[in-house]
Image: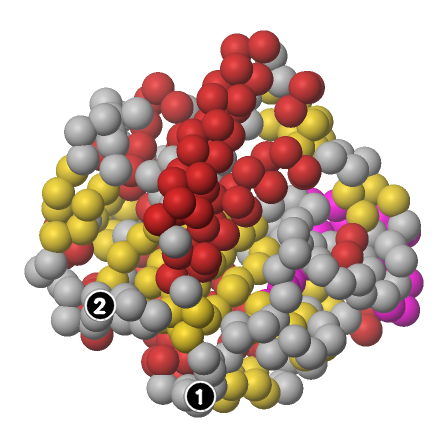
Amino acid sequence: MAQKCIFCGNKPQQKNKEHVIPQWLSKYLGRYNSVCTVPGATDYEITFAKLTFPACKACNDADSKLEGEAKAVVEKLMNSKSVTGQEISTLMDWFDKLRVGLWLGQLTLQKKLDLMDPNFYINDRVGAKDRMLIIERVKDMGNGLGLVGNDTNIFLYSPCVFQVWFNDILITNASTDGLVSGKLGFPRLSKLTSTGYRGATATLTKGINRTVHPVVMNIDGTNKTVLYQPIFKQYTPNPFYDVPYVQQHCYDINKGLGGIFVQKNGNAIQYMKPDDKITLLPKAQPKNNVLDSMKRVYELQNHVITKLNDTESHTSAVQQMIKASLLQNQVIIKRIEKAK
Ligand SMILES: [Zn+2]
């Protein structure tokens, strides 16, 4: 099997290794030498220390800035210190990296990298599509570090939604085209129509220049902090973006980088200027039922596929695969509901 750099997808130059789950995180949580189960036909048991994949030295070096900045934000999050809108945007970049890196790592371990033919790598997906984070505390979680939702067929097909938990903190991350833009008042995307394997296209309509609740499914900010960021890199320039509303709610309009919107404790959705500060995880935030919170990852995966994609535009073989994958998630959701 040809080795590919997980950042750029090329043959690694001056080969290096990249920890998909960063060393600073597993060490910080005292889990560097703990076993991490990687899903697959037969589950792979591997320590976080050994969960490394090929990367170019240059790609790895270029990434160290993001890692350094993300580490500082994660530490603030865990210590209930305030963070700026700009820092949240960095945290979102880091989750893009983690999610896509994990997916490529799993394909590598399952020896499906050639079979699944990923046509994007980490560098293609950091800051590339609409994204959101849900940050909450959950009950009945032991200390440690783990992943949720990365073991489904939907994640394997389209790595848009997963969860990471560290200690009693659960973070849900989702990113795909059209996830939040329209409801945040930005130009709206139609459902994505397939243009071939993993390719898709969509049409744009004018934005409504105001936010609409709920932004995604029925998720609100009760006992959690929900963060949204519209990203339209691949749809700009387009006159629909040349409106005051979009200009006033962007961190970098030329890069198609919208600003951070936050919904917290049942309050209305608020826009954060780059320097505005909030505490993402107040010390006093009540803990949620872990099953309710984990169920959401499977619901969100199905939401992304059924609500944001025109699944009928795929070939019948892909449609069959999608149908079976959606069903797999529905079974998991039912099982969780029963366990409650
Ligand atoms: Zn590279």
Report the disc number at residue 72: none
190 or 286: nearer the viewer? 286
Is-magenta flag for residue 243? Answer: yes
Is any atom of residue 196 visible in this view? yes
Residue 278, position as x, y percentages in the image: 56, 85
Q: Amino acid at mark 1?
A: Ala
Position of 152 relative to 217 (above/below): above
Badge number at residue 284: 1
Asked if the stretch drawn in magenta spans residue 235, the answer is: yes
| Residue 256 is at least partly visible in this image | no
Of marks 1 and 2, which one's residue comes earlier in the chain? 2
What span is colored magenta in the figure? 227-245
* SS at circle 1: loop
Horizontal placement of 107 versus 271: left or right?
Answer: left
Q: Position of residue 21 (x, y in %)?
A: 27, 57
- Left or right relative to 230: residue 189: right
